[in-house]
Image (cartoon, helix red, strand yellow):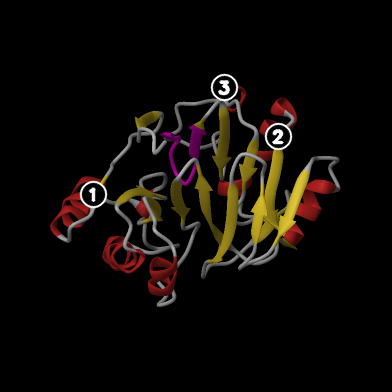
């Protein structure tokens, strides 16, 4: 399983010749080093409808004939653009052929903001659990800390959690550490930080605190990848 961090909340997962991209925001992302046309993927997972999470979803989906998986309302929005979608809802699993994905709750907001400042309801915000080739990976989406993370950790053997630590709009580092502990993730990759001034954080310091509480911290620069190996 190869994991590539493209900056902000954009994570790419690759295994067995297949690829999943979560929350593609590359165009207009000041820390991104990858362009949308560089992305090759089969499935796009969208946690919510904010522009810094869906920004390049349409372009990447069209270029790759990729399927978009999102909350029902957001999936319906993309279906109206003649894109291939799977609409689902919180608590359910979806089969994407080579993996299964579960939509989990997140505490945030969600809406598509049009060029003239109108807001279109984008459904509930969410996170995802991806079960693939023996790996269980969790993407928190944009969320505050919530106590049911403990239940999620008890029910799922999470290998890697991608957790927001930027603060201001999501959990900060302190709450991120608590989330990591409750989720009982073997490893944690911090996301949603340093893209803009209000969410500047020291990810290395966060990783050191993870290590102190017995969890591996993996800090990736935008464009950097890590090979987790195989569970086969």
In this view, 86 is above or below 62: below
Which quadrant of the view contains residue 2?
top left
- In percent of width and height, residue 163 lies at 39, 55
Q: On the picture, is 41 further left or further right than 3? A: right
C-alpha distance separating marks 3 and 1 = 30 Å
Q: Does the magenta portion include 122?
A: no
Name which residue lies at 35% across and 35% down: 228
Residue marked by disc 1: 216
Secondary structure of the residue carrying numbered label 1: strand
Residue marked by disc 2: 66
Secondary structure of the residue carrying numbered label 3: helix
C-alpha distance separating marks 3 and 2 = 14 Å
- In percent of width and height, residue 124 lies at 64, 67
> Which contiguous range is marked in magenta?
1-14
Q: Which mark is residue 100?
A: none
Which of labels 3 and 2 is toward the front? Answer: 2
Q: Does the magenta portion include 6?
A: yes
C-alpha distance separating marks 1 and 2 = 32 Å
Identify the image quadrant of the C terminus: top left
Q: Residues within 10 Å of mark 1 (few under 14, many from 20)?
A: some
- In percent of width and height, residue 67 lies at 72, 40
State if disc 2 and disc 3 touch (CB < 8 Å).
no
Which quadrant of the view contains residue 44?
top right
- In percent of width and height, residue 103 lies at 59, 60
Which of labels 3 and 1 is toward the front? Answer: 1
Q: On the picture, is 137 further left or further right than 101? A: left
Residue marked by disc 3: 38
State if disc 1 and disc 3 touch (CB < 8 Å).
no
Along the polypeptide, which appears first: circle 3 or circle 2?
A: 3
In this view, 43 is above or below 88: above
Name which residue lies at 31% across and 62% down: 184
Name which residue lies at 67% across and 61% down: 111
């Amino acid at each position: 399983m190869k994991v590539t961090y493209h900056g902000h909340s954009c994570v790419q997962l690759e295994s067995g010749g297949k690829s999943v991209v979560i929350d593609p925001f590359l165009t207009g992302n000041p820390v991104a080093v990858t362009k949308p046309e560089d992305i090759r993927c089969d499935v796009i997972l969208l946690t919510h409808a904010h522009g810094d999470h869906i920004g390049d979803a349409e372009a990447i989906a069209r270029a790759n004939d990729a399927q978009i998986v999102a909350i029902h309302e957001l999936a319906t929005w993309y279906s109206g653009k003649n894109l291939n979608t799977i609409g689902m809802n919180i608590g359910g699993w979806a089969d994407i052929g080579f993996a299964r994905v579960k939509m989990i709750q997140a505490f945030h907001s969600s809406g598509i903001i049009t060029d003239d400042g109108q807001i279109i309801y984008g459904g509930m915000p969410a996170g995802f659990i991806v079960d693939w080739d023996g790996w269980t990976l969790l993407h928190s989406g944009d969320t505050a800390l919530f106590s049911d993370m403990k239940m999620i950790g008890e029910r799922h053997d999470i290998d890697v959690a991608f957790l927001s630590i930027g603060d201001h709009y999501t959990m900060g580092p302190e709450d991120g550490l608590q989330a990591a502990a409750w989720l009982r993730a073997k490893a944690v990759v911090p996301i949603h930080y340093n893209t803009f001034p209000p969410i500047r954080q020291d990810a290395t310091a966060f990783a050191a605190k993870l290590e102190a509480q017995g969890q591996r911290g993996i800090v990736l620069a935008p464009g950097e990848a890590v090979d987790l190996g195989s569970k086969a």
